[in-house]
Amino acid sequence: MEERRLLLAVALSLVVLTAYSLLFAPPPAPPPASSPVPVVVPTPAAFAEAPRGEAAAAGAPAEARTVPAATPVSAEREHRVEVQAPDYTVAFTNRGARPVSWTLARHRDARGGPEEMIPAQGAAVRPLDVETGDPAVDARLRDALFAPSAETVAVTGAEEAPLRFSWSDGDLAAEKTLVFRPNGLVAVTVSVTRNGQPLPARLLWGPGVGNPSAQEREVQGYQAPRGVVLAAGVVEPLDAANLPPAGREFAGVEWVGVESHYFAALFVAPGAAAAVRPIAVPARPDEKPSVAPVAVVDARGPQPVQLFVGAKDHQAMAKLGHSLERVVPVGDWIGPIVVALMGILRWVQSHVGNWGWSIVVLTVLINLAMAPFRHYSIVNGLKMAKLSPEMKAIQERYRKVPLMDPKRQQMQEEIGALYAKHGMSMGSQMMVGCLPLLLTMPFLFAFYRVLTVSVELRGAPFLWISDLAQKDPLFLTPVLMGVSMFVMQKMTPSTMDPAQQRIMMLMPLMLAGMFLWAPAGLNLYWLTSNLWSILQQGVTMKLLRPADAPRERRSR
């Protein structure tokens, strides 16, 4: 009985952990409780320090980065400047030299178009704004008509493609240079001078990143855009709603940026001062106002700030270096298993051609590898079910004996004798009962994590499901998952009393209810795993029962 309860406790822990991750996922950022969050804050002390590196500390920025103060430079009118690359397209407005669109060719939004990374919310801060600490200067830079070095830029082959924006009104001058690289990183260099003297220059990204649809926001486990920073070897997520109005500052970072569930915009500037701030954004239709994160990084270093904008693809980001892949939350202790399963899932998909069927195939392969352990667990359950009547009789005789009474030792001796009578050992049975579950749990957790962080599932169809990252539109998979759990419980030999069994029968209903708004890919995984367990348990019990039947007849 004690061993069965231990098994039940471990199994319930697995269910509770899974339910907790879905039921108590971080909610969307609430609206600010008091006065609106200021857009521009006083210059942080960290940014007021000398520029990074000896070269920058020695004096003014390099001559090539400074527009002569006496030479007015400006465009005649506002117009678009476009950058075309195989994996992305960027459109700038020369007013403020700001990007107005950054689309990803390999990822599609709810309407079937390329995924847009520039937030649609109208706010004073926009991506790649320049901040000097002087609000008047910042306003002039945002409204200035920069002169671009080219109207269109093509990124092809292995060559870098530069794009430079220049502006000057005689005393204030600014230059913003972007070098688009084939690997996806963009080098950004900024300089601002007044009367020939350099001013502090900081780059901003925000508010938020991307434009999550209403369907994405209602999925259980949805992660609203938030700040994220890698400093001192630790990745720290920063919810905008929990930040102080002035934000949080960091003296030295590897990278800082803004992330959503599947996408991120990150400034890579090793050793730079950085900050993450909250900013109020207008409300979407039928929603309340909210706050969004803005990432800020010091751009005065001797090396250009590198910018990553794209999907949180662990494999692709690992190739870029700078530990960018750590923005993907694969986990710590199960991280290596998650990364390995990601690679296997991609390999299966390359042969199967559909992400839904790939989930089914990989789930079957994992369960097939775990089949011997589950077999021993089923065999142990059958043995414990046979012992149950005699064990309950022993426990009933000592039910009124206090726990600290010496007679309790006699109960343990009788239970040990009962195990020996049936050729079993208390210690070995506990190991046989618990070890299979303990060995399989890391893989179950790891594959669960794979399905929650794999950006490839976003927009992937399967039969009647149009997007495996969204909820099942017909709710078939969560309902069938609950039914399969009920069947599994009915098939499993139990030593629990009738009251406990009735409570356990409610678990499938409760779990199915919690999974209704879970991503369809997760429900497909649990359903496939349950169906395999039903099949294995049925086959195992059919093979074991005939061997037990002659013994039962002989005993009669």
Image: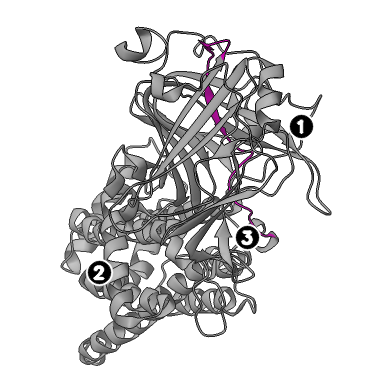
Query: What mark, if any, has residue 370 been given in the picture?
Result: 2
| Dot 1 crowding, Cα within 10 Å, few <14, some 14–19, many 20+ | some
Decide whether residue 274 is among the magenta residues: no
Which residue in the structure is indicated by mark 1? Answer: 32
Q: Which residues are magenta?
A: 194-213
Q: Secondary structure at mark 1?
A: loop
Say whether disc 2 or disc 1 marks the residue closer to the N-terminus.
Answer: 1
How far across and how far down the image is residue 238, in percent?
Answer: 54, 33
Which residue in the structure is indicated by mark 3? Answer: 216
Asked if residue 382 shows in the view, the reply is no
Say whether disc 1 or disc 3 marks the residue closer to the N-terminus.
Answer: 1
| Residue 25, above or below 535 | above
Q: Nearer the viewer, residue 87 or 180?
A: 180
Mark 1 residue type:
Pro
Q: Secondary structure at mark 2?
A: helix
| Residue 119, above or below 378 | above
Quadrant including the N terminus: bottom left
Q: Name the residue at 49% across, 46% down.
A: 264
Q: Are marks 2 and 1 in contact (CB under 8 Å)?
A: no
Cα gap from disc 2 to disc 1, whole angstroms: 49 Å
